[in-house]
Amino acid sequence: MTKAQLLKELSTLQNRVSELEIIEKEHRKLQEELKKRTNEFEERFAELKDHQARIQKNLLESEKRFQSLTDNSPIGILIVQKGQIIYENPVEKRLSGPLAQLFQHGKLENIHPDDFEKVDKEFQKIMSGEVKSIDMDFRYYPKGKEDDTHEMIWVHCWASLIEYLGEEAILVNKLDITRAKESEHLLRIEDKMASLGRVASGIAHEIRSPLSGINIFLNNLEKTLLEEKSQDKVKVILKQIRSASNKIEAVIRKVMDFAKPTEPRFILLDLNQPIEDAIDLSATALRMNGISLHKELAETLPLCQADPNLIEQVILNLISNAAEAMKSSEDAKQIHITSSARDDRIIVCISDSGPGVPFHLRKKIFDPFFTTKNGSTGIGLSLCQRIIIDHGGNLSVSTSKWGGAEFRVEIPIRRERKQG
Ligand code: ADP
């Protein structure tokens, strides 16, 4: 090998060496970068693990919170999915007993017989998806003893369609309202007793004066019979006794009327007809007392099941009460009568420009024998209310546009059959 060749070889080797040096440098750089990245990755991984642990801890805590929330809720909670109960809180378990199986087997045997149909219908609706939520009160026997009323529970139940773990489910909430229902019942009894008290004192009040009259007349009669030529005097006293006894008889007849009112004879009827009849009948008396009557009756009313005579009697009574209320009024005396159909009801309003009914008397005026008038019986409104209730409707009082009284008669268009 010549010197020139050796030099060339040397230079090639030098080039290779410097190339290798560059490669080694690059390799070192890459190793450093790799170490750095690995460190970063490990840091990130540790962070992620930390994060995951935190999430898991939070999830556990939130589950615990949910658990303690539902465990301590006074409301019974259950979730039903695909006809199976997948969650029940302790209150629900205590409340429902075997009732919970209702969703698994379609059994409703513990439900109170009077509520059975309603509960069955409502649950079928929500389970078939026909409605999104239901809301009702019902009674049942947690231990299945239908005859043991002490074991009966009243619940208010809400159920709604929800999404649970990605699938459709029904969330049912139940609140034990047995105590509230019992107090409601007691209150109703108390209310009835108070009404009964007022009725009894009303009857006593009505009968007391003619009865003491009879006693006085009997004493007079006794004395008169001892006198000579007492015949004429006796006749007068007997007349007085008869009049007092007639008064007592009239009171008793009214009480009987109230206790056993005429059974309505329902026919399919345009309610405007008995209203018009009542207006015609009272027209002369109203005119004579300076009262103007304005009517605004619906042109066409849906026909409804009603007794025309009884409805006419109610409207007449309300018109005559309005007229009496305005008797001593100095201002214009006005009565306004309207009829209209709203939803499933026919509404008749009789308003007047009299003094109105004070708030504290708005319940009492419907009690038999309650009256604020001298020499009146106080039986009219209680009879009217009775008739309207027998029609499945409602009679209420509020304030008219003149600040007087407005009586509102509501009659259902379709009459529901009375139960029991
Ligand atoms: P009565 O007319 O014999 O008093 P009701 O039962 O018809 O018996 O009425 C009871 C009470 O209701 C009346 O005494 C009166 O105080 C009150 N009332 C009835 N209608 C009206 C009215 N339109 N405006 C003011 N008060 C009324």
Image (tube, helix red, strand yellow):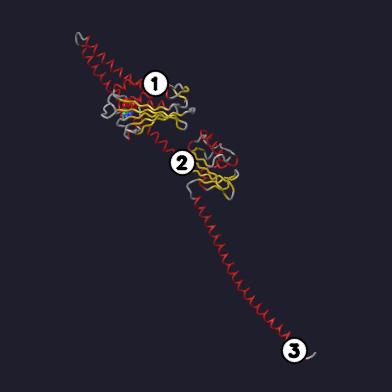
Residue 141 location (% of width, % of height):
52, 38
Q: Quadrant of residue 9?
A: bottom right
Indicate which label's residue lies in the foreground, 2 or 3: 3
Indicate which label's residue lies in the foreground, 3 or 1: 3
Q: Residue furthest bottom?
A: 3
Please tell me which residue lies in front, 221 or 167: 167
Name which of mark 3 and mark 1 comes first in the sequence: 3
Q: What residue is pinned by disc 1?
A: 277
Tell me if residue 201 can be seen.
no
Q: Residue at x 26, y 15 (%)?
A: 240
Q: Does dot 1 land on a helix, a strand or a loop?
A: helix
The residue carrying pointer 1 sits among few (fewer than 14), some (14 to 19) or many (20 or more) residues within 10 Å by Cα, namely some
Q: Does dot 3 land on a helix, a strand or a loop?
A: helix
Please tell me which residue lies in front, 63 or 350: 350
Q: Amino acid at mark 3?
A: Leu
Indicate which label's residue lies in the foreground, 2 or 1: 1
Q: Does dot 2 land on a helix, a strand or a loop?
A: loop
Please tell me which residue lies in front, 401 or 312: 401
Q: Amino acid at mark 1?
A: Asp
Report the Cα–Cα distance between label 2 and label 1.
48 Å
- Quarter in which the N terminus is drawn: bottom right
Q: What residue is pinned by disc 3?
A: 7
Q: Residue furthest left?
A: 228
Report the Cα–Cα distance between label 3 and label 1.
140 Å
Q: Amino acid at mark 2?
A: Ile
Q: What residue is pinned by disc 2?
A: 177
Q: Quadrant of residue 108?
A: top right
Name which of mark 2 and mark 1 comes first in the sequence: 2
Q: Residue furthest front?
A: 4
Residue 22 location (% of width, % of height):
67, 80
Q: Residue at x 42, y 24 (%)?
A: 272
Q: Quadrant of residue 17?
A: bottom right
